[in-house]
Structures are given as C-alpha cells and as structure tokens.
Image (cartoon, rainbow, N blue to C red):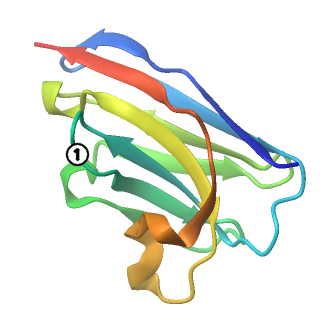
Amino acid sequence: QVEVEESGGGSVQAGGSLRLSCVVSGSPFNTNLMAWFRQYPGEEREAVAAIRTGGAGSYYHDSVKGRFTISQDIAKKAAYLQMNSLKPEDTAKYYCARGRVVGINQWADPRQFTYWGQGTQVTVSS
C-alpha cells in the first residue's frame, strides 16, 4: 500500500519562508514525477511545481518561479518544496502527489497523478 504524507505547513507573515516535505512509503507503480499542488477554497487543485523522479527536469507555475524550489531525495522517495518570499495569495492547502507523465505539458494535470497526500495548510498573513 502506498501512502503519501506531507509536513511542514503553517502560518507565516508575508515575505517569510516555509519548507514542505513529502515522503512516499510503499512501492508506487509506474511513476516518474513528484509534484506539489495547491487548492484554494472552492477551486480546483493547481499545480505549483514538479520534478522528475529520474532526476532530470523540474517545472514551476509562473506565479512561483524564482520564489519556490522543488527538490527530492530519490532514495527516500521524498520531495521538498522550499517556499521563499511568501505572499498572502500563496495561502492554500498544499498537496504532494506522485504520478506518471509522458509529455512535458502533462506535469500540471492532476489526472496524471495516482498517489496523493492529505494536504498541509499554508497560511500567509499580510
């Protein structure tokens, strides 16, 4: 059984930083990408960043480029999201996911991800 567990969320003032962690336990089947999504109340999940589990290639939503950095520990099946210069509009629930994509354009499509965590809340105050 595969489980995905996030940690590291919390409350911070604008301009501050947080680091999210995600660990996948078990043996995920046929995957090649780990990603972070976020969800605002009443809206669909939005891809924030993703990284190929083979180590080559990372992708970012335009709104977080230059502020967020995704990294991973392949051996631990872990992914991290370093979030700097946080803004109130970054306030959301953040989810870690693991899945498989064929084309680069699929990285932001939540339908490509089989395994999901329960999410961790990030709140940024102004």
Find residue 45 and report its horizontal and vertical position in percent: 34, 51
- Residue at left offset 49%, top offset 60%: 50
User: Residue 87 placed where, x, y %?
Assistant: 17, 28
In the image, 1: left or right of 58? right
Residue extending furthest bottom?
103
* Residue 52 visible (yes or no): yes
Q: Quadrant of the C terminus?
A: top left
**Quadrant of residue 115 within the rendered picture:** bottom right
Q: Is residue 57 above or below residue 44?
A: below
- Give the residue at the far left of this rendering: 126
- In the depicted structure, whether residue 5 falls above or below residue 103: above
Taking the spot 53% from the left edge, 72% from the top edge, the residue there is 112
Left or right placement of residue 7 versus residue 45 in this view: right
**Is residue 83 among what the camera can see?**
no
Residue 32 position (above or below residue 95):
below
Q: Residues within 10 Å of mark 1 (few under 14, many from 20)?
A: few
Element class at badge 1: loop
Percent of width and height locating residue 16 = 29, 18
Q: Please name whichever residue, 18 or 96, is drawn nearer the observer in this view of the structure.
A: 96
| Quarter of the figure with residue 30 | bottom right
Report the residue at 42% width, 55% height from top.
49
Looking at the image, residue 122 sits to the left or right of residue 13; the answer is right
Taking depth in this image into account, of 83 and 106 the one nearest to the observer is 106
Residue denoted by label 1: 43
Q: In the image, what residue occupies the spot 63% across and 66% down?
A: 99
Q: Position of residue 33 (x, y in %)?
A: 62, 67
- Three-letter residue code for mark 1: Glu
